[in-house]
Image (cartoon, rainbow, N blue to C red):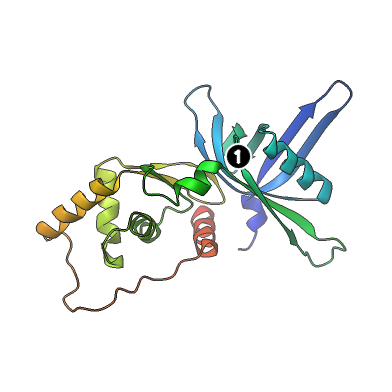
Amino acid sequence: MKNAHLRFGWLTYVKSTEKTTTSIKLHLDRFIGELLPDPPRQAKAHLISVIGGDTQISAISAAISLGDRFMIEGPDVPPTRVCLERNAQCFKGSIQVPGRKKPLRHLIGMSEELISANRSSNTGKLLLAGSGKEFVWASVADIYGLPGIPEWASWFEDELNTHHAIAPMLGIGCNPLIVKGEKDQFLDWLSWGVESDAIQFPGQPGPICWPGLSLKDIFFQSARQLGS
């Protein structure tokens, strides 16, 4: 994670009233969003993670609750206008930095779709923070309740690409993507894979052990990929 700050982006918030103009610019360490086709350079935000002082973080939290828009930019991401839309949720925390008397404040804003869609298999759309094939397969299998083993990850990635069921999203500090499809569709792929011997069940009966993968692992893995 050496020079991790070089991979940070910026979030800018400007709001004008009859009497005053508020302008805030914060370090943006993570962003996930969907680019909108029209108008250009606008996106539907799904996750915003920013670091700043008490007053700045409070202002951004209030702006999210009001559905206000922000400008974000970062490595390989040009200035883009974004909004978390209604019913977004905020989570706040503190980061104690050596040498500072007061801790930095950390805020994560999440869209209603990111919170709710990944808890249900009925939306036909998954928003994932990582693009690693093992993580994608494990997430789809878990959320949709699909039978399978970790070794099928490469085969499943090929199926997603063949059926154009996967698409990248706009990301800063991570490599997010969208997986599109219904449970019945994925079960058809698995049925064909077993029948054609493209994938095989284990030869011996017993429990299937899936490797553990935390959100921290996903973001660190993405940071290493972005830095390479």
Which residue is painted at 24% across and 44% down in the image?
Answer: 162
In the figure, 184 relative to 199: above or below? above
**What is the count of numbered marks?**
1
Residue 209: give x, y in percent of width and height: 34, 74
Query: What residue occupies the far left of the structure in this picture?
Result: 196
In the displayed structure image, the side of residue 149 where residue 100 appears, left or right: right
Residue 6: give x, y in percent of width and height: 65, 52
**Pick the front one: 186 or 14:** 186
Task: Say which residue label 1 marks.
Answer: 87
In the figure, 80 relative to 57: above or below? above
Locate residue 104: give its quadrant.
bottom right
Dot 1: what SS? loop
In the figure, 216 relative to 205: above or below? above
In the displayed structure image, the side of residue 64 where residue 84 appears, left or right: left
Q: Amino acid at mark 1?
A: Asn
**Pick the front one: 12 or 210:** 210
Which residue is painted at 26% across and 63% down in the image?
Answer: 148
Residue 196 seen in the figure: no
Residue 155: give x, y in percent of width and height: 24, 57
